[in-house]
Image (cartoon, grey):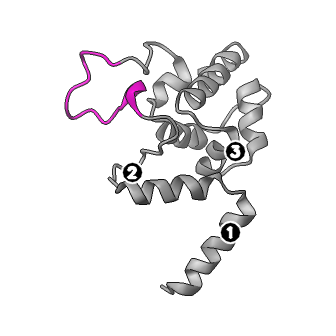
Amino acid sequence: MANLWYMPSRVPAISARIQRARKTRGLTQEVLAERVHVTRGAIGHWEQGVTLPSTAHLNTLAKVLGVPMEWLVNGGANPFQKTQKAGKDSNFTGIEEAKGLYTVNQEIFDKETLLTARKFYRLPKKQRRIIRDLLDQLLPT
């Protein structure tokens, strides 16, 4: 028996939810691809419904995008609206999260660190790699 979520009729819906969550979080396909550890083309194919992400990739997508995996797969209630049911122990941040912030790790950074991180992620991949290599040489582990 085939997995129900993989049925062709669900492909457009899953694709649309991936794209909606990415755009709501203010992420580009390239940034999302880096965080999920896939190519930008893979994200594009998932959003166009050409292919579907594996279960492992769906799990990672859900974490990176801050949405329930159940919503990515099956849809349902809008995860971007704050609900009364979400208690204090809920880690779902909803739409109130600032665009482009990566909140899988619930760490708090000072403003200078956040500003530096934003500048870093605006650089092309090759320049970021140069900076990481430089940091590795300056701060050996």
The image shows residue 21, relative to residue 29, as above or below, that is above
Residue in the foreground of this view, choosing between 126 and 1: 126
The residue positioned 32% from the left and 53% from the top of the image is 108
The stretch drawn in magenta includes residue 88: yes
The mark that comes first in sequence, 2 or 1, is 2
The residue positioned 24% from the left and 18% from the top of the image is 85
Q: Quadrant of residue 41?
A: top right
Q: Quadrant of residue 87?
A: top left
Q: Residue furthest left?
A: 88
Decide whether the magenta segment is chiefly helix, strand or loop: loop
Residue annotated with mark 3: 30
The residue positioned 53% from the left and 43% from the top of the image is 60
- Circle number at residue 129: 1
Q: Residues within 10 Å of mark 1 (few under 14, many from 20)?
A: few
Q: CA distance from mark 2 to mark 3?
A: 20 Å
Amino acid type, callout 3: Glu
Range covered by the magenta-colored residues? 82-97
Q: CA distance from mark 1 to mark 3?
A: 15 Å
